[in-house]
Image: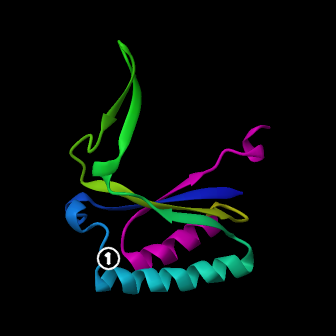
């Protein structure tokens, strides 16, 4: 079963002016994450992972009374913002929790686990 792992970071800690320049601490954490990613690749559980752009360069498209509109970000006062995602393909929810727990240990930020609605959900 595939799961989407959503990684959040404190909005206050993510400065748009320095978002493209990772700190030494971030580089060290990412190096550890890449080692773990390699482990998941070897077990066949890794699908993909990507970091996301800063919220100030985001766009939201929504329906409005006048039609569909696109608005620039940021959109609301948030304490945490979505910073990255990963897709894993594992045997069950427990394995997804185990993997997310190891990532949280390395990166220190919370991760939301969401099942990806595939063939398992079509009955």
Residue 57 in the figure: left or right of residue 63: left
Instruction: Identify the image quadrant of the N terminus.
Output: bottom right
Q: Residue 54 lies in magenta, yes or no? A: no
User: What is the span of residues highlighted in magenta in the rendered image?
Assistant: 94-123
Q: Whole-percent x and y of residue 46?
A: 66, 70
Q: Residue 119 lies in magenta, yes or no? A: yes
Instruction: Identify the image quadrant of the C terminus.
Output: top right
Which of the 4 quarters of the picture holds residue 95? bottom right
* Residue at figure coordinates x 48%, y 75% from the top left: 103
Q: Whole-percent x and y of residue 47?
A: 66, 65
Establish if 48 lies above or below 108: above
Residue 90 in the figure: left or right of residue 14: right
Q: Whole-percent x and y of residue 107?
A: 40, 76
Q: What residue is disc 1 on?
A: 22
Which of the 4 quarters of the picture holds residue 30? bottom left
* Residue at figure coordinates x 72%, y 45% from the top left: 118
Q: Whole-percent x and y of residue 94?
A: 62, 66
Q: Nearer the viewer, residue 96 or 44?
A: 44
Residue 106 in the figure: left or right of residue 96: left
* Residue at figure coordinates x 40%, y 27% from the top left: 62
Q: Nearer the viewer, residue 31 or 123?
A: 31
Establish if 55 lies above or below 43: above
* Residue at figure coordinates x 24%, y 41% from the top left: 76
Which of the 4 quarters of the picture holds residue 80? bottom left
> Outermost residue, top direction?
66
- Crowding near the residue tagged with mark 1, few <14, some 14–19, many ≥20 C-alpha atoms within 10 Å: few
């Amino acid at each position: 079963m595939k799961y989407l792992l959503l990684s959040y970071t404190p909005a206050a800690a993510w400065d748009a002016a320095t978002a493209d320049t990772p700190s030494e601490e971030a580089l060290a954490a990412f190096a550890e994450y890449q080692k773990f990613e390699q482990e998941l690749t070897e077990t066949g559980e890794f699908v993909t992972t990507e970091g996301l752009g800063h919220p100030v360069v985001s766009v939201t498209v929504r329906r409005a009374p006048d039609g569909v509109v696109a608005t620039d970000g940021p959109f609301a006062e948030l304490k945490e913002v979505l910073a990255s995602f990963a897709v894993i393909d594992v045997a069950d929810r427990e394995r997804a929790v185990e993997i997310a727990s190891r990532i949280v240990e390395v990166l220190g930020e919370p991760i939301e686990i969401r099942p990806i609605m595939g063939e398992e959900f079509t009955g």
